[in-house]
Image: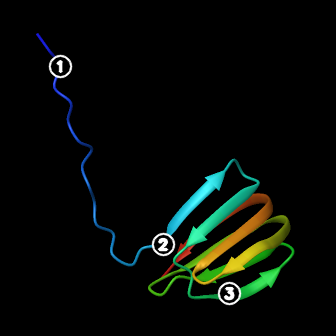
Amino acid sequence: MAKEKHAAPRFEFGSAPLIEMTGNRLVTIEGSTGILLYERGSVKISTGRMVVSFGGRGLRLRCISGSCVEISGFISKIEFLS
């Protein structure tokens, strides 16, 4: 009996940001509308409906373009604030 392939369900998240992490050293946020705070130990990114806060050591903004921000460093905390 042949196995059927099922398509993965699609979810619509509307204006929610897309956040991609590589371990705890690199994060990419797509859907950024601005940088609210940038310090070596704390970065806050506005995404329209919410603010995403990153805490850690040696945080750096590696790339800022249009609606995309890339943060590197030792990321130890992520908070979603609305």
Say which amino acid is labelled 1. Lys
Query: Where does the image place residue 48, in percent across and percent down from the top left?
Result: 48, 87
Q: Quickly name the residue at label 2.
A: 17
Q: Secondary structure at mark 2?
A: loop
* Residue at the (76%, 54%) spot, across then down: 25
For the point 69% across and 47% down, the residue is 23
Label 3 Cα neighbours within 10 Å, binned few <14 / some 14-19 / many ≥20: some
Mark 1 neighbour class, 10 Å CA radius: few under 14, some 14 to 19, many 20 or more: few
Three-letter code, disc 2: Pro
Query: Marks 3 and 1, Cα distance to the nearest angstrom?
Result: 48 Å
Residue bearing mark 1: 3
Q: Quadrant of the N terminus?
A: top left
Q: Identify the amino acid type marked 3.
A: Ile
Q: Is residue 66 visible?
A: yes
Q: Is residue 29 above or below residue 7?
A: below
Q: Is 13 displayed left or right of 68 in the figure? A: left
- Most extreme residue toward the left is 1
| Residue of label 3 | 35
Viewer-closest of 51 and 13? 13
Pointer 3 or 2: first along the chain: 2
Give the quarter of the image for residue 11.
Answer: bottom left
**2 or 1: tag closer to the N-terminus:** 1
Residue 39 placement: quadrant: bottom right
Locate residue 79, reporting x and y percent: 59, 69
How far is mark 2 from mark 1, CA to CA?
Answer: 35 Å
Please tell me the numbered disc located at residue 50.
none
